[in-house]
Image: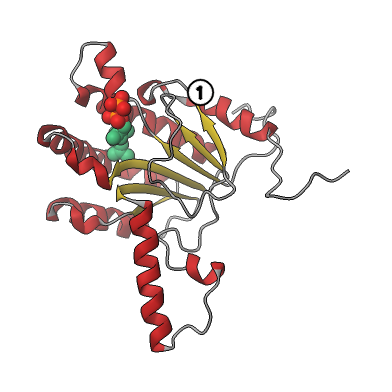
Amino acid sequence: MDTDEIKNLPVHVAIIMDGNGRWARQRNLPRVEGHLVGMESVRDVVTTTRKLNIPYLTLYAFSKENWTRPKEEVKRLLEILEIYLERELPLMMENGIRLNILGDIRDFPKRIQRKLQETMEKTKRNKDMWLNIALSYSARKEILQAAKTLAEDYRRGSIKRINERVFERYLWTSGMPDPDLLIRTSGEMRISNFLLWQIAYTELYVTEILWPDFRKEAYMEALKEYSRRDRRFGRVKEA
Ligand code: FPP
C-alpha cells in the first residue's frame, strides 16, 4: 500500500459513520440499504487500518439515542449487526483483530448479547489491532458509570487518590491511547455524545462523503490530512 506521502500515521482512529440514510434517500432506496452498503465501508476501513498497522480503530455504530428510531429500522440494524459479526469473524481471526464493545450490551436482546460476548471471547488473543465498536453508546453514560464505580472503590479504600490517570481506568477504553484522529462523514459538525473524555486533544476531520461511499481512497485522504496537522497539545510551537 502506498503510504509514502503519510509521514506520521495515527495510533488510534475513531469514526462517526454518518449518512447511511441520506445515501439511500438519494437513490430512492429504503434506509436499510444504506446501512447494508455501509457495512461494506466498515470492511474496507477495517482492512485498510490493519494493512497500515494502525493498532486502534473505534467505530460509532449505534448510539444510546438510536433506540428511539422507528422500530423497523432498529430491528434491521440489529440484524445487520448479527450478519456483520457472523461474516467478519474469519477476517478478524486471519488479521489478528480483537473485537471490543464500548457501550452497554445489556441493552441488546439476549441472542445478540451472546453473539457479541462470543466474538469478543474468540478474538481475545488477537494482538495486531483493536476494533472497538460503540453500541448503545453514550459518552455521558460512560463517564457517569466510571465516576460511580470510582466513587465506590474510593469509599472502600481500594484506590487512594483520584486523578486523570486513575479515572481513565474506569472508562470503557481503559488501557487504550486516546484517539489521535476523529473522522465524521456526511458533513455534520457535531460530536454526538461520542468519546467526550477521550477526544480532548484529538484532531477532527469532517468530510461531506456519506458513509456508504467512504472507502479506502477517502480514508487515505483523511490520514494524509492528519499527517499534515501540527499537533501541539496546548503547547506553543518550538522555534
Ligand atoms: C448513521 O447513518 C449510521 C448508523 C446509525 C448505523 C451505522 C451502521 C453501519 C455503518 C452498518 C453496520 C456496521 C457495523 C459495525 C455492524 P444515519 O442512518 O444516521 O444516516 P442519516 O443521517 O443520513 O439519516
Does 16 appear above or below 214?
below
Residue 210: percent from left, percent from top: 39, 22
Q: Quadrant of ligand 1?
A: top left
Left or right: where does residue 84 sit relative to residue 58? left
Crowding at dot 1, Cα within 10 Å, few <14 / some 14-19 / many 20+, comes out as: some
Instruction: Work out whether residue 163 or residue 26 is closer to the camera in this orientation and state it.
Output: 163
Residue 106: percent from left, percent from top: 20, 59
Left or right: where does residue 35 sit relative to residue 183? left
Res 172 → quadrant: bottom left
| Amino acid carrying mark 1 in the image | Ala
Q: Image quadrant for the C terminus?
A: top right
Residue 30: percent from left, percent from top: 18, 20
Q: Residue furthest left?
A: 72
Left or right: where does residue 19 sit relative to residue 81? right
Give the labeled residue for mark 1: 218
Q: Residue furthest bottom?
A: 157
Instruction: Work out whether residue 234 or residue 66 is closer to the camera in this orientation and state it.
Output: 234
Left or right: where does residue 194 sit relative to residue 164? left
**Residue at figure coordinates x 28%, y 12% from the top left:** 26
Circle 1 SS class? helix
Tally of numbered discs: 1
